[in-house]
Image (cartoon, rainbow, N blue to C red):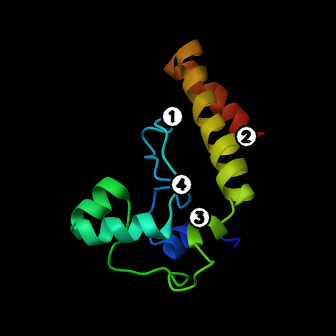
Amino acid sequence: YIADYPEQALLACIVQGWCPKCTGKSVDLDGGGTQHTCEHTEQLIKLLDLGTLWTEYGVVGDVVPFTNDFPRADIHELLSPDLLHQLIKGVFKDHLVEWIVTYLISKNGKAHGEAVLTEIDDR
């Protein structure tokens, strides 16, 4: 299922900012999150209150994925990465631009670094 990230979050019934495919937290990407499954989500919903689901697991517990009753369709397996927005823009553009801005200001000082950035923006 191809969708941009906001739609993936809606389809997988996860909180914006969490991964629709795995249980890893965004602040701990090396933490070894496991694959999201409908069974895992259903067990969490049975055991925990909505607030805990939201904050600790990134699960929207009062919404059910449309694939929930299809025996061979788990929305977490069906979703594929949105390469344009999640990889190219998210990693290469946003992260790289932020890193370059930080580098230029630390290397050249705030005033000169911002002058260099202004010159780059003018091009």
Quadrant assignment for the C terminus: top right
**Residue 51 image point, x, y percent:** 22, 65
Q: In the image, is residue 88 above or below residue 8?
A: above
Marks 4/2 in contact by CB < 8 Å: the verdict is: no
Going by the numbered disc 2, the residue's amino acid type is Asp
User: Cα distance, mark 3 to mark 1?
Assistant: 21 Å
Could you say which disc has been placed on residue 122 in the image?
2
Specify whether residue 107 is in view.
Answer: yes
- Residue for point 58% across, 13% down: 107
Which comes sooner in the sequence, label 4 or label 2? 4
User: Cα distance, mark 3 to mark 2?
Assistant: 31 Å
Q: Which residue is mark 1?
A: 30
Which comes sooner in the sequence, label 2 or label 1? 1
Which comes sooner in the sequence, label 3 or label 2? 3
Q: In the image, is residue 123 above or below residue 101?
A: below
Q: Is residue 59 left or right of residue 118?
A: left
Which comes sooner in the sequence, label 3 or label 1? 3
User: Cα distance, mark 3 to mark 4?
Assistant: 17 Å
- Residue for point 69% across, 49% down: 87
Given residues 49 and 55, the one toward you in this image is 49
Badge 4 marks a residue whose secondary structure is loop
Nearer the viewer's eye, disc 2 or disc 1?
1
